[in-house]
Image (tube, rainbow, N blue to C red):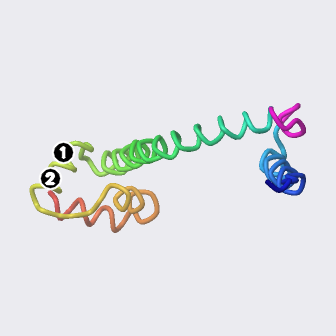
Amino acid sequence: MTRVKKGVHALKRRRSVLKQTKGMRHGRSTKERQAKEALLHAGNYSFAHRRDKKSHNRKLWNIKINAGARELGISYSKLIDALKKKNILVDRKILSDLAENHPKTFARVIENVK
């Protein structure tokens, strides 16, 4: 078999890993083994937290809707129930945006529900 020299590719891989860990503290940004391990953990955390972000945002939307609805004299649960009964299809993300940035429009939505 022919001889394979992997110097170019090894260096390329090493530079890629160290480039991705730039800005990390201590040996993680300079030592290849620690950098590789840090990248593996970072990848796992980012995968898990992409899922957590969705539930976190939904909780935040619910809080904003509840705050806006209580100012107008209705609780969150009664508002959502009334929206479903009236068959008004507005999701929580849009409702929270209306409650926060467009209170007049949000008030009109609640008037239609009452």
The answer to if 30 sits in the magenta stretch is: yes
Q: Nearer the viewer, residue 98 or 49?
A: 49
Q: In which quadrant of the rendered image does the N terminus lie?
A: bottom right
Q: Give the side of residue 95 with respect to residue 85, left or right.
A: right
Image side of residue 34 versus residue 45, left or right: right
* Residue 45: x %, y % from top left: 59, 37
39 is within the stretch colored magenta? no
Q: What stretch is highlighted in magenta?
A: 25-33
Q: Where is residue 37 in the image (x, y as percent from the top left)?
A: 72, 33
Q: Residue at x 39, y 47 (%)?
A: 58
Residue position for label 2: 82
Closer to the camera, 90 or 22?
22
Q: Using a 10 Å C-alpha cutoff, classify the residue at mark 2 as few (fewer than 14 neighbours), some (14 to 19) or many (20 or more).
A: some
Is label 1 in contact with label 2 (beta carbons under 8 Å)?
yes
- Measured from the top left, where is residue 70 in percent x and y? 31, 45
Residue occupied by mark 1: 78
